[in-house]
Image (spheres, rainbow, N blue to C red):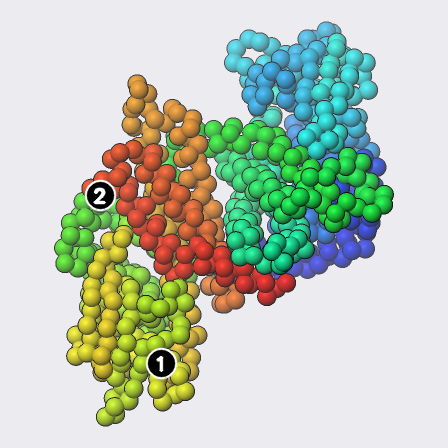
Amino acid sequence: MMTETQDIDEFRQEVRQFLAENLPSDIAAKVKGGYELNKNELLDWHKCLYARGWAAPGWPEAYGGPGWSEAQKYVFEEECARGHAPQLIPMGLITVAPLLIAYASEEQKARYLPPILKGEEVWCQGFSEPEAGSDLAALRCKAVRDGDDYIVTGSKIWTTHAQWADWCELLVRTSSDGPRQKGITVLLVDMKSPGITVRPLPSLDGLHVLNQVFFEDVRVPVTQRVGEEGEGWTLLKSTIGHERVLNADVGRSKMLLHRLRHIAARETRYGAPLLSHLPFAMTVARFAVRVKALELCVMRVINDPALALRPESSLLKIRGTELQQDISRETSDALGPYALPYHRDVLSSGWPSDPVGPDYCATPTPFYFFWRKASISAGTNEVQRNIIAKSLLSSDFSADVQGLSEEQKMLQETSRRFLREEYGFTDRRKAMQSGDGYREKIWSDFAEMGWLALPFAEADGGLDGTALDLLLLSEAFGASLVNEPYLGSVVLGGGIVAATATEDQKERLLPPLFEGRRKLAFAYAEPQSGYDPGPVTTRARRKDGKWRLSGHKSIVLGAATAETLLVTATCDDTAGETAVFAVDAQAKGVTLTAYPTIDGRAAADIHLDGAVAELLGSGPGKSDQDMAKVLRQATLAAIGEAIGAMEAAVTLTKEHLNTRVQFGKPLAALQVLQHRLVDMFIAAEEARALGRWAAETLDQGRDEESDHALSLAKAYIGDAGRMVGEQAVQLHGAIAITDEFYIGHYLKRLTAIDKLFGDTDHHLMRLVKTAEREE
């Protein structure tokens, strides 16, 4: 994702060293514990960062910024959160300065930017009003021109840190003619001006952060107007997208999750640490999945900053704030009865004597109350969903080409186009009702286009495709609900041959597979296995110089039409080691019980009774590693299919909402349905980000990281895919529960994918075990 990895790693170490040497320990302790910092503490840290040149990471170098790349800015914010550095007073640095840099006069820049950068002047933001809520265009605070001044009358509310502010970035109405947005102007107001009154609004945690500000005939010089009169709305839009990206705040989410783990490891339930209880540990693991999904979506914006000004930025704000709220609620719940005591002064200065309960109990519940604001400020999350819905309902769901080579873009485009044109739902249903469940003509087309050889090394006669190539092709398969046995025959069957077979065996088995003349199936699972491929009870015995297999293999994808079965078995003469064997599907002693899966794929259970088999490779010893490699690829392919199915379900549901008329208007006009569609869209976007990352780790050969990435993605897709499928059915109405209509089949496919290679709970438990090892 980030480029120049070595430079980024060196920069990360530089930031860590700076924090270790310069961040006061008492401030870090207050941040770590969730305690309030006062104005002087925040400004002291601001000035420390300014001395290093790091106070304004987002500013251009010409105005005093450090000249960092987007990746460096992200790493800096992440390391500051990790090191418990306080977030600086944000309004001047993060919201006012970008506006000034983009639109202010040179005189205004020279006057206002240096004090902001140095931490000498504090700013607040006068946007929201008592009667306007999130509808900024409805503001009433007015400014009337009087010679060289404006006279401002009205009030602003929810104004953060107005009690500290020296200046206010104020939105006012200068005209009521024409569209509401045309009459808005930006003024820079000195908070010491006569006629300004600040009224504290204690928040739910009892702290003073918010205020109402009254303006009674306040004179503001015209020279303190930014841009032209009536241009405020246009100027404002350029900063709001930036603010939504900031509200993703992945660093804060990681810090909150760390705090939750810290507390849960110390709180006890039934005589054991709360974190040791599997249901709670799986809840924490789910948060870890969501944090990673959010982080990867942020990385997408980092790699393409233009996305910050598009509706995608609303996705980040929604997911970031809701994630933080959920973690804060769980942290409060983890305290049990010690969530009840409340001490206002303790939130600022800590305990003067012995604390009531553990020392970490004072702040989580007040923070939970206070952080309800996160989904309200900078435009409520409902407004953000409206923004996404407007864009989504009026445009196509575009394929994500970020980071793809020209060849990969072509693979993505041609595979999707071919399947749209040649793989209609009606033909698919007819094929499902036939004996094999798919069409040989389509399989031959796959071979002709090279797809059957795609994931194999060039040395084996393949096309040397990457894991990302496989993911992209699988996404196309998922979007069209492909039933052809690509996953079972190519990824699993061909994959285990490529991983274990001798060169001679590969030459016999793989070319016919690539040409579409032979199908393979990999039989590794057994009735007692669940999602664990071992231990293997199928036995391999030598008799009369031949290997013979006996046992039962279950739910073997593609076995019903395979000519050759690849079977794992425990060898009697090798101290219980496992190996992979090739078996003719028509051989004596092989009995197949074929059936369709719930989503229409062909599968079978296989009973082996002394079936003659050929040992693949040089013998037992590394089949476990080979199988792990193949299952990684198969899991990625299943993830890709889920991503494609989710994207298609969103697109089809969007089209239905736009065209289906009920009660005299399109369903798309109903906000409740819009918001459901948006949540489906967000889930698909996060799934895609996780899938791309998993493919990246596989392509880089990082097995341990790949296992982690695949578990994160598979755990997410299990829940999110089912949600998308269920909502698609719900939003289509009664027709969706009929088998002859396409949308319900996406729910079937997404449900089935959840059951392949480990469902959500299985992968969450893997993540729990990984976290336990790292403790």
- State the residue at coordinates (57%, 42%): 326
Q: From the image, which quarter does the N terminus lie in?
A: bottom right
Residue 436 lies, in percent from the top left, at 17, 59
Q: In terms of image quadrants, where is residue 236?
A: top right
Q: Position of residue 674 (x, y in %)?
A: 41, 30
Q: Is residue 4 in view?
A: no
Q: Secondary structure at mark 1?
A: strand
| Type of amino acid under label 2 | Asp
Rendered residue at 26%/79% (across/down): 550
Q: Is residue 257 visible?
A: yes
Say which residue appears at 61% left-offset and 44% top-offset: 333
Question: How far across and how far down the image is residue 729, in percent?
Answer: 32, 38
Quarter of the rendering containing residue 529: bottom left
Residue 137 lies, in percent from the top left, at 56, 18
Q: CA distance from mark 2 to mark 1?
A: 42 Å
Q: Farthest bottom residue?
A: 544
* Camera-side residue of 683 and 61: 683
Q: Callout 2: few (<14), some (14-19), or many (20+) C-alpha neighbours within 10 Å?
A: few
In the figure, is residue 685 to the left or right of 39? left
Depicted 671 relative to depicted 465: above or below: above
Please identify the residue farthest to the top as the structure is shown.
146
Quadrant placement of the C terminus: bottom right
Task: Please say if 685 is above or below 482.
Answer: above
Closest to the observer, 710 or 232: 710
Vertical relation: 288 (above or below) 670 = below
Residue identified by numbered label 1:
570
Task: From the viewer's perspective, tell me whether residue 723 is left or right of residue 512.
Answer: right
Q: Which residue is mark 2?
A: 739
Q: Residues within 10 Å of mark 1 (few under 14, many from 20)?
A: many
